[in-house]
């Protein structure tokens, strides 16, 4: 279809960023995007920054440089560029703003480029190199960021932070243990699931017929 609906436009509650120690010479009220760290940093003083996890451009679509925020849009429409539609013929020429739209709840446009800092309809992509050069955030995070910046705010994209800053930030970011296929397979189901599987070996009692059985609900 040439135009596709993006779905509803619910109110999004801001999600506060993580405040971290960040001793640097970056100007206050500027945005630093760290490609390797998959993070966006809003400088609030010469010693602190607000940190947001993001998704960055995948291989072949990453870039570095400095732009300024030129426009902010709420639930923006999405117009996939022609080269993107060439790669995926199923894309529409336009998708209206909404929860199905990949630009999410807000978009902060960078200069006159096609790049944006924006929300997402795919929260699982945060922390990955998955975009075509834009920077994805959780909808709650981009709403929070948009309330803290303004038109003209400088945005600098770097491939990585200086080594000392990189170490300092990494020590402040909580790390979850990686989940491999081996560890996932070795996990036992929780007690309720085991009880559920035992019941599936035989038909449910007659008094369950005609009613919703909580033990037979997989969702």
Image (cartoon, helix red, strand yellow):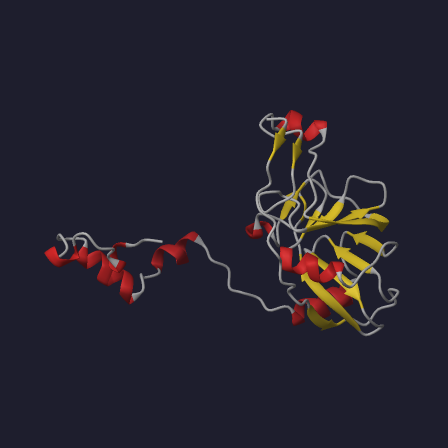
Residue positioned 78% across, 44% down in the render: 63
Camera sees residue 183: yes
Q: Quadrant of residue 11?
A: bottom right
Between residues 61 and 144, which one lies in front from this camera angle? 144
Of all residues, the one furthest to the left in this rendering is: 206
Q: Quadrant of residue 215?
A: bottom left
Q: Position of residue 13 (x, y in %)?
A: 62, 62
Q: Position of residue 162 (x, y in %)?
A: 79, 62
Q: Nearer the viewer, residue 51 or 74?
A: 74
Left or right: 199 in relation to 51: left
Q: What residue is at 72 percent from the left and 42 percent from the top? A: 133
Can residue 138 be seen here? The reply is no
Rendering coords of residue 156 (x, y %):
83, 54
Say which of 179 and 106 sits in front.
106
Which residue is nearer to you in this view: 211 or 65? 211
Q: Is residue 219 left or right of residue 100?
A: left
Seen at 71% across and 68% down, the residue is 169
Q: Quadrant of the N terminus?
A: top right
Where residue 118 sits: x, y (%)? 70, 50
Q: Is residue 194 above or below residue 129?
A: below
Q: Where 117 falls versus 5 (above or below)?
A: below
Label count reads 0
């Amino acid at each position: 279809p040439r135009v596709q609906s993006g779905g509803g436009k619910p109110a999004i509650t801001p999600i506060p960023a993580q405040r971290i120690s960040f001793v640097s010479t970056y100007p206050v009220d500027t945005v630093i995007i760290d490609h390797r760290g998959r993070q966006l940093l809003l400088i609030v003083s010469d010693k602190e920054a607000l940190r947001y996890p993001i998704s960055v451009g995948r291989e072949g679509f990453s870039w570095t440089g400095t732009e300024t925020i030129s426009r902010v849009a709420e639930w923006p429409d999405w117009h996939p560029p022609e080269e993107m539609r060439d790669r995926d013929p199923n894309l529409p020429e336009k998708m209206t703003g909404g929860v199905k739209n990949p630009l999410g709840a807000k978009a902060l446009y960078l200069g006159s480029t096609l790049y944006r800092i924006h929300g997402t309809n795919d929260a699982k992509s945060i922390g990955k190199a998955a975009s075509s050069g834009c920077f994805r955030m959780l909808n709650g995070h981009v709403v929070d960021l948009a309330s803290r910046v303004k038109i003209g705010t400088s945005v600098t994209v770097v491939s990585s932070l200086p080594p000392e800053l990189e170490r300092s930030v990494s020590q402040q970011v909580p790390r979850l243990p990686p989940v491999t296929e081996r560890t996932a397979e070795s996990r036992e189901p929780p007690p309720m699931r085991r009880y559920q599987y035992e019941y599936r070996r035989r038909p449910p009692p007659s008094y369950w017929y005609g009613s919703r059985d909580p033990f037979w609900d997989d969702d």
